[in-house]
Amino acid sequence: MLIGSPVGRDAQVLGAVVVVAPTDEVRSDVLVRLLVLGGLGAATLLLAACGVVVPAVGWVLRPVHALDVTAKRLSSGDMDARASETGPTELRDLAHTFNGMADSVQASRAQQRELVADAAHQLGNPLTALRLRVENLASEGVDRDDIEPVLEETDRLSATVESLLHLSRVGVATVTRTRVDVAAIVRHRCEMWAPVFDRLTVHAPPEAPALATVEVLDTALDALLDNAAKFAPGSPVEVTVTPAGGSPFVADVRVRVVDHGPGLHPDDPAKVGARFFRGRTHQNVQGTGLGLAIVRAPDRVRR
């Protein structure tokens, strides 16, 4: 900082006095104080945000996250999942509406199962009585060759009713997955099915642990082997168990059943698994068209 002052007498200027004062120390001190004040202000603002804004945002977003988790559980087949009715009024109303929708869907599915189960149960007794009456016709002199086609159709209808009853029960009971040895289960089931095939080969490691239930794996494997026996008679069948990952507790194991039969019509693969679907080239093969539908039921796949 420079300060200059003239020196003189009357109107005559004889000289000047100049004072030079350095300001570096003052500027540094002011800068330090400004930085300290700015830091304190930022820290105060951050603490206020953490103490007020973060809890407020969490209070708003936490119910949204919980609702998303509940929706995923419902989509995976857990019909007992319900959203927590907490948070702002709008989100509580949304959760209440969502839970009402879930209750309606669950009730509708229960009614469908009960309808199918009741229909299958009510059809079972008349079919049994019908078969007995037809068989009694043979003792009354009716030609057995004339009765046999009726008995075959009765048995086919009985199998369809039994499959419908099984389908209605899929996913009704809550099943807890446990650690099972997929390789051992597959080898055991293939031993039971071996007499049906000319050649049944199993490729499986000594052990393939996974989270599943024995009943689910048995049902799926039986349906696939049954299809191979019906639709590819005489062809070799290969069953392969492939574990994923190398951890001691494997969570993903793939089981493949491959036959060498004639295959499906080019337009049929996309429809496989639909209820009562029969391939164009297999219309006359015995079956109900419900085996793969039961295997692919969402609740069964999830568990």
Image (cartoon, rainbow, N blue to C red):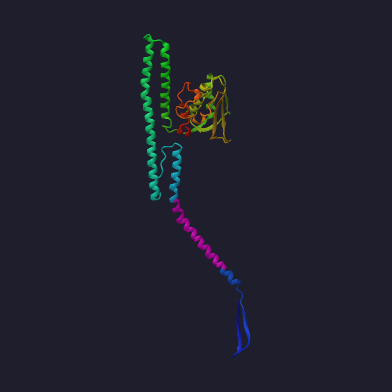
Above or below 98: residue 294: above
Q: Is residue 152 above or below residue 241?
A: above
Query: Tag count in the figure?
Result: 0
Residue 132: name its quadrant. Answer: top left
Residue at the location (42% across, 24% down)? Answer: 160
* Left or right: 253, with 111 as reference point: right
Residue 42 lies within the magenta run: yes
Seen as rendered, the residue at the extreme top is: 141
Name the image quarter holding residue 197. Answer: top right
Q: Nearer the viewer, residue 282 or 249?
A: 282
Where residue 7 appears, as percent x and y from the top left, is 61, 86
Which residue: 54% across, 67% down? 34
What residue lies at 54% left-to-right and 65% top-to-bottom?
36
Q: Which residues are magenta?
A: 31-58
Q: Inspect the magenta stretch and tell me whether residue 287 lies in it.
A: no
Residue 263 is situated, as x and y percent measured from the top left of the image, at: 54, 25
Does 152 sit left or right of 5 as displayed? left
Quarter of the figure with the N terminus: bottom right
Determine whether, in the image, residue 228 is placed left or right of residue 18.
left
